[in-house]
Amino acid sequence: MADQLITNALTIDVEDYFQVSALAPYIARSEWETRECRVERNVERILAMLNEQGTKATFFTLGWIAERYPQLVRRIVADGHELASHGYGHARASDLSPAEFSADIGSAKRLLEDISGQEVKGYRAPSFSIGEHNLWAFDCLERTGYRYSSSIYPIRHDHYGMPNAPRFAHRVRAGLLELPVTTARFFERNWPASGGGYFRLLPYALSRWLLRRVNTTDRQPVIFYFHPWEIDPRQPRVAGIDAKTRFRHYVNLQHMEGRLRRLLTDFHWGRVDQVFLPADPVVPGAHR
């Protein structure tokens, strides 16, 4: 039975398998239009699963996807979920100049709002690509009108991470909160505990224990994330990729949906804006 004491934030990064940053060396941006797009059917399956459980979530959606599947964006909103921005074209924030980044997040926000008729409050950088070397991105987000970001993963990783960042919600600008993806802390180090490839790799019982530890020991809500392609074991296989990328992308795809269903019943979940914005209790530097 779900723990009703804390409502956690369930998030979905709406992108397709061929847009994953780790596959960028193998799939050129110019090839996206030629690839089989499977995001619509996968998001529909996720929406059905959430509806069965009466769960609401936040969908960080690429502008590129929204432009091609506006009816999917409207369905997300009609089902009572929060629509948020994942940028337009899945460009890593760390690869863009401030001007390029502002243009990307601005065009995505306007597009999503025009399609949905709803304010877009939140942003998540592709591949958690805001870190110590591009903190100027928060200035851009605040100027563009976002109210929160969930773009920092306070771990060590070969593609992203800011291990010394605060682990929990904190204010990074006067009008902007940063909501880091959840970690568990052991042996003076932060460990991933909140979704993606780690959730597919680790035994479900261990993932559940880590999340419960954050709820019970830290007394903080979890921010969990996954992608629509992670419930799609029949997605086209990308040829010629290196062994590490192949393992990370394809490991345990066949088990993901079943694990998500267990997760939905073992914890209480809600939208990011409803979990973090109403009370807005955080102060700078809080909850390390």
Image (tube, rainbow, N blue to C red):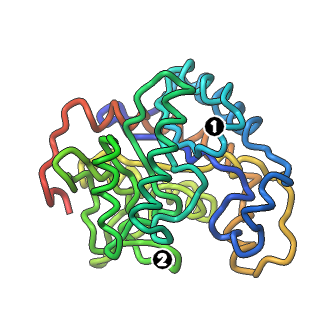
Q: Residue at x 63, y 59 (%)?
A: 200
Q: Is residue 260 left or right of residue 87?
A: right
- Picture coordinates of residue 257, whole percent (x, y): 68, 44
| Residue 157 - label | 2
- Picture coordinates of residue 201, whole percent (x, y): 62, 65
Q: Nearer the viewer, residue 183 or 125?
A: 125
Residue that sits furthest to the top in the current view:
78
The kind of residue tagged 1 is Ala
- Picture coordinates of residue 76, whole percent (x, y): 58, 27
Give the secondary structure at mark 1. helix
Q: Nearer the viewer, residue 233 or 15?
A: 15
Q: Quadrant of residue 183?
A: bottom left
- Picture coordinates of residue 223, whole percent (x, y): 40, 48
Q: CA distance from mark 2 to mark 1?
A: 29 Å
Give the secondary structure at mark 2. loop
Q: Is residue 57 left or right of residue 242?
A: left
Q: Contact (CB < 8 A) between labels 2 and 1?
A: no
Is disc 1 surrounded by few (<14), some (14 to 19) or many (20+) residues within 10 Å? many
Q: Is residue 55 left or right of residue 258?
A: left
Q: Is residue 67 above or below residue 162?
A: above
The kind of residue tagged 2 is His
Q: Earlier in the sequence, mark 2 or mark 1?
A: 1
Q: Is residue 150 above or below residue 46?
A: below
Q: Residue at x 45, y 51 (%)?
A: 124
Determine if residue 79 is in view. yes
| Residue 66 - label | 1
Q: Residue at x 59, y 43 (%)?
A: 63
Determine if residue 11 is in view. no
Please identify the quadrant where the C terminus is shown.
bottom left
